[in-house]
Image (tube, rainbow, N blue to C red):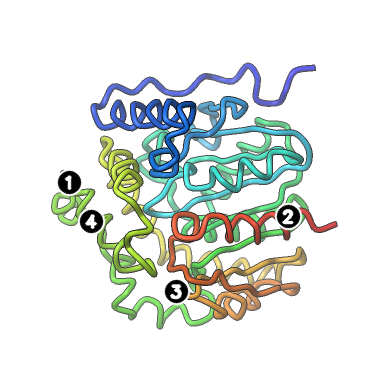
Amino acid sequence: MSLPWEGLPGPPKVSQSGIERLFMRRYIFLVASLLGMSSLAHAGVAPYASSFHEQQIPTNGTHLYVRVGGHGPAVLMLHGFGDTGDMWQPAATALMKDHTVIVPDLRGLGLSEPASDGYTKKNQAEDMAGLLDQLHIDKVTLVSHDIGNMVAYAFAVQHPTRVTRWVAIDAPLPGIGDWDAQLRSPRTWHFNFHGPDEERLVAGRERIYLDRFWNELSADPSAIDEATREHYAALYARPHAIHDAFEQFAAFPQDAIDNQALLASRGKLPMPVLALGAEKSYGARMADIFRNVATDVTGGVIANSGHWVMEEQPAATSALIEQFVRKP
């Protein structure tokens, strides 16, 4: 019997020098692991095992780069800004023992196809619906972080029967709760930083720009090591990538309008939600934010972590995700 992702197009061919370096680092990581060089093997972004199938999957007028592995009930894991689906590797590896794990790069980010438009979270939710249709998967547990939370909410509120439960990690929802105060916070000035001149300022300086977030939004900047920073900087330096990243933020005003309308017309989400905040970031406020949109919310705090939970506290974050996903 063929698996749902078999027969789909293979991963993209890339020739940019930054991406070549990225894959060379993955090769070095594997060699180091085989040789028992533990100090090197724990640095940087770990590659997904060969048991994950990496594909370009057409959906909703674009192509998403997707990793799929495992068997059993499906889990869809959505990343945010400054990361790609690579961030989920530790949790995805643990979950694939008894789940089918689906890890896309969001529209225009990572190794997904560049897209000139379509960055409202309501539309990106349809990216996910089409992706699941292509994989012949009906229901999923959602796991999301940062902008991934926003796409996950838009998916859950438009397709509530397709979501069994949801882990939402350390980011608010446009238009919901104290969103206006969030827009005025100096820590999130980047929510309003986008446009052609801003892109020109950042072009060729993606590493400098991303360092600001890793340094200022973490509990300890050293937790995001040099190899990890180089890995993501190379991906965000790909042609069109920083434009696509900024488009995620440029869509926030429309996202706020959409979210308020969806909440008013569809009501609160019925599925169980685990709202996890990082201790040095949103913390316990995450549960309060998500009680605006869901009826069954459990709160949790990831200790000794800033916003970058999978880089700063991968084991603790993965354990909380696994515990909730595996609840009967």
Earlier in the chain: of badge 1 and badge 2, it is: 1
Q: 207 left or right of 319? A: left
**Which three-letter amino acid code belongs to the residue tagged 3?**
Ser
Where residue 21 sits, quadrant-wise, is top left
**Which three-letter amino acid code belongs to the residue tagged 1?**
Ala
Earlier in the chain: of badge 4 and badge 3, it is: 4
**What residue is drawn where x is 45% and y is 40%?**
38
Any part of residue 109 in sight: no
**Which three-letter amino acid code belongs to the residue tagged 2?**
Val
Earlier in the chain: of badge 2 and badge 3, it is: 3
Mark 1 lies on residue = 203
Earlier in the chain: of badge 3 and badge 1, it is: 1
x and y, in percent, of residue 20 in the image? 30, 26
Quadrant in which the N terminus is drawn: top right
Real-space CA distance between mark 1 and mark 2, rounded to the nearest whole angstrom: 39 Å
Mark 3 lies on residue = 281
Along the line of sight, the residue nearer the viewer: 83 or 289: 83
Earlier in the chain: of badge 4 and badge 1, it is: 1
Residue 86, above or below 219: above
